[in-house]
Amino acid sequence: MKPKKYCYRCSNSFVNGIDPEYDGYAGTIGKSDGSVNMMVSSAGLNKPAPVTLEVWKWSEEMKQNIRIAVFVPRYCPFCGRKIKENIPYLRKQEKKRNANKN
């Protein structure tokens, strides 16, 4: 059986068989005005969600980037792979939302 290939953005320890502590990829995928950017991050087993899209904004006051939004996709926006390792996290979040509705 031929090994599957995943794009470098969504590849992580779940799919490539390396050390679970390894953060597979983190890189900027877009910038708006120099102070806001978007990045994709694929993390190891001990992180809350393996593949995330994150929006960061530079805080001049704090002299560091601040994460202002996080999106946990079901599919990689670059290669279309179904990100099965995100499903447990997404289900847990859905349960929390449903519990808050009641």
Image (cartoon, rainbow, N blue to C red):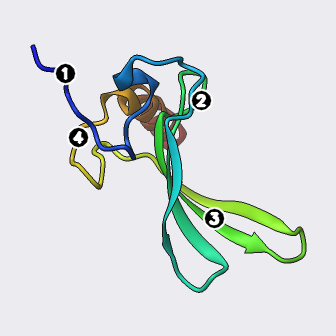
For disc 4, the neighbor class at 10 Å (few under 14, some 14 to 19, many from 20) is some
For label 2, the residue is 47
Instruction: Give the mark, 3 or 2, whose residue is nearer the N terminus.
Output: 2
Q: Earlier in the sequence, mark 3 or mark 1?
A: 1
User: Mark 1 sits on what residue?
Assistant: 3
Q: Callout 1, which amino acid?
A: Pro
Question: Is residue 87 or residue 100 the one in the foreground?
Answer: 87
Type of residue at label 3?
A: Trp
Camera-side residue of 97 and 38: 38
Q: CA distance from mark 4 to mark 3?
A: 24 Å
Answer with mark 4 or mark 3, whichever residue precedes in sequence. Answer: 3
Q: Is residue 77 left or right of residue 31?
A: left
- Bin the neighbour count of mark 2 within 10 Å (Cα to Cα): few under 14, some 14-19, many 20 and up: few
Q: Which residue is mark 3?
A: 56
Secondary structure under badge 3? Answer: strand
Position of 48 relative to 35 (above/below): above
Residue 90 lies left or right of residue 41; in this view the side is: left
Label pair 3/2, CB-CB below 8 angstroms: no
* Disc 4 residue type (three-letter): Arg
Label 4: which residue? 81
Residues marked 3 and 1 touching at CB (< 8 Å):
no
